[in-house]
Amino acid sequence: MFRYIIRRMIYAVPVLLISSILVFVVMHVAVSPTAGLALNPRISAKDIIRYKHDLGLDKSGFQQYMTWITHFLQGNWGKSLIANRSVFADIKTALANTIVLGVIATVFSLAVGVGIGVYSALRQYSWFDHFSTSAAFVGLSIPNFWFALLLQIFFGVYLTKWLHLKTPIFYTAGLYTPGQVGFHLIDRLRHLFLPMLVLAVQIIAVYSRYMRASMLEVLHSDYLRTARAKGLRERRVIVRHAMRNALIPLTTQVALDVGGIAGGLIITETIFEYPGMGRYFIKAIGNGDYAQVLPWLMVAVTFVIVFNLVADIMYAVLDPRIRYA
């Protein structure tokens, strides 16, 4: 197992380098950080040339990339080309906000989705099974942006008007109330609820279907019949033996979802103006600020690689029959 982990970590290095090179090339070809300056009549051509020189944009693409990757590996992530802010500090804040939202949505979805999937499998073809199956298909069919807009209109406009409230029960934008000083748990939860709900709808649908299919396969296995023949309680058979093995296929999906959190929940964060990695990425792309985009990419790809490895390790934990050479 240890050799397998080391080998996977070594393979991750060229993946990170190739990803950073591709994004660097695309950013340089598609977007210019000085395009907005050229539209300002008060900025002369000499000012633009001096600006490019100060930021090192007058060097070749290879020199710019080597300068950036060298500084990045040394822990110096540089500053934004547009805002002149520390990239590391901005990404650290955005990543923390995204992890909070993503983890809450994933944990909630996992609890609800696994519960629905297990009960549907135990009550196959019952009214609950048919209802949960239909609800899952509806959840998978709802576009995130459309559902987010519906929630904003309902909670932000109609429900507030009907109940004659000064502020919505659940806020429709931001992370905290403007002017607020310090951390307030209730206020933070009121801001997190709607984006969490948007994310959870599709995740619950996916997890419940995974769990139902996996449980149905496990419930007809020989070792469960043997466990029952030994006189074990049905609850122990289901929880200790069936669910543990049924969770193995779901482990991959959960690990991929958690790994993808660092890449940003782009649509949800943009609609709710949530200051996370997704909104950070959209703003950086719009500004053509590769000094922000490249570290964002490295963090996102690293999370995906790490949690894919975590999924493989969890396979061995959940099923002792699985071993890696």
Image (cartoon, rainbow, N blue to C red):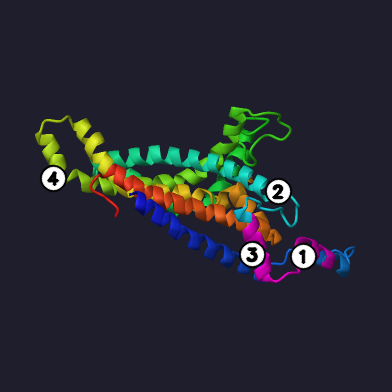
> Which residue lies at the image location 69% right of the left edge and 53% below the top edge?
78
Considering the numbered disc 2 on the image, is that residue within a helix, a strand or a loop?
loop
Say what amino acid the circle numbered 2 marks.
Answer: Ser
Considering the numbered disc 3 on the image, is that residue within a helix, a strand or a loop?
helix
Front label number (1 vs 2) = 2
Quarter occupied by the C terminus: bottom left
Q: Position of residue 308 (x, y in %)?
A: 41, 52
Q: Position of residue 193 (x, y in %)?
A: 54, 37
Residue 67: numbered disc: none
Front label number (2 vs 4) = 2
Q: Classify mark 4: residues with Cα within 10 Å, few (<14), some (14-19) or many (20+).
A: few
Instruction: Check residue 53 for magenta coloring.
Output: yes
Question: Which of the two labelled residues, at mark 1 and mark 2, occupies the earlier sequence position?
Answer: 1
Say what amino acid the circle numbered 3 marks.
Answer: Met
Question: Which of the two labelled residues, at mark 2 and mark 3, occupies the earlier sequence position?
Answer: 3
The CA span between labels 2 and 3 is: 19 Å
Considering the numbered disc 1 on the image, is that residue within a helix, a strand or a loop?
loop
Q: Can you identify the residue that label 2 sits on?
A: 86
Q: Can you identify the residue that label 4 sits on?
A: 222
Predominant SS along the magenta part: helix
Say what amino acid the circle numbered 1 marks.
Answer: Thr
**Does residue 68 lie above or below 182 as drawn?**
below
Q: Can you identify the residue that label 1 sits on?
A: 34
Q: Can you identify the residue that label 3 sits on?
A: 66
Question: Which of the two labelled residues, at mark 4 and mark 3, occupies the earlier sequence position?
Answer: 3
Q: Classify mark 1: residues with Cα within 10 Å, few (<14), some (14-19) or many (20+).
A: some
**Does residue 83 lie above or below 34 as drawn?**
above
